[in-house]
Amino acid sequence: MPEKVIGVLGGMGPEATLDFYGKLIRLTPARRDQDHLQVIIDSNPKVPDRTQAILHGGESPVRYLVEGAERLRLAGAHFIVIPCVSAHYFLEELSRRSPLPIISILDATIQEISQRWPWAKRVGLLGTVGTLKGGHFQRRLAANGFETIIPDETEQGLVMEAIYCVKDSQGSTRRGEMVEALEGVLVRLAQRGAQLAIAGCTELPIILPDTCGGLPVVDPLVALARAAIREAGLEPL
């Protein structure tokens, strides 16, 4: 069966898209260029802020995402992945309007946890305020038997500061400081019962190590990369 072409709706943010593509490459079982999968990336950082749309009635990103999906279809993609968690708040509407099927980063992450950490039932969730207050990720986790533990208001302020530090192209000198702040947040989530932590905004895996604050850190971009490779027709590393 011919391999499928992967379409990436990216730019939310740009470095998270770059990080996803690197992980996709490293997880593909390839010995030479020709063994890799064909990938088409539409990186559009002009998509409106997802948190503003979720919480404050800001402009919806759906029109922009549908337009990107159509560009990917015309370019030859067979399915779409979106390396942005907060964009998945709009997944139901987007899926209805998209010309191509979309693999959910939420479902891919839950599958990754179930396979790699089957003993974990209480998960700490880091993400944007939009993701946490929107509640889609928590509902998907609950439907699969997981209890979600989220940061308190003060801790969430630190998480958002870290996310926007990564989005800021001038913020690289503060990334070490942000990791220390996130480590403190994860220590407190562990004290409240979390058995692992989901880096539930795709900027966070860029700076977080695999283990932080005594907790394994789940990288949704790794999970999404593996799901995309499988959908394209290969078995990921």
Image (spheres, rainbow, N blue to C red):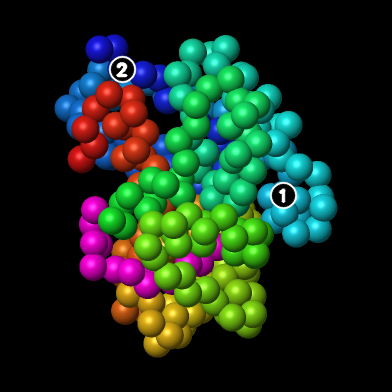
**Residue type, label 2:** Glu
**Residue 179 is one of the magenta-drawn residues:** no
Front position in the image: 86 or 175: 86
Drawn side of residue 164 relative to residue 150, left or right: right
The secondary element bearing badge 2 is classed as: loop
Image location of residue 194, percent across then percent down: 38, 77
What is the quadrant of the C terminus in the image?
A: top left
Contact, mark 1 vs mark 2 (Cβ under 8 Å): no
Drawn side of residue 46 relative to residue 85, left or right: right
Front position in the image: 62 or 214: 62
Numbered circle sitting on residue 3: 2
Residue range highlighted in magenta: 115-127
**Residue type, label 1:** Asp
Image location of residue 91, percent across then percent down: 59, 40
Residue 121 lies, with reference to residue 193, above or below; the image says above
How many numbered marks appear?
Answer: 2
What is the quadrant of the N terminus in the image?
A: top left
For this orientation, the residue located farthest to the left is 31
The Cα–Cα distance between marks 1 and 2, rounded to whole angstroms, is: 34 Å
Image location of residue 8, percent across then percent down: 50, 31
Residue 21 lies, with reference to residue 115, above or below; the image says above
Tell me if I can see residue 12 in this picture: no
- Residue highlighted by disc 1: 49
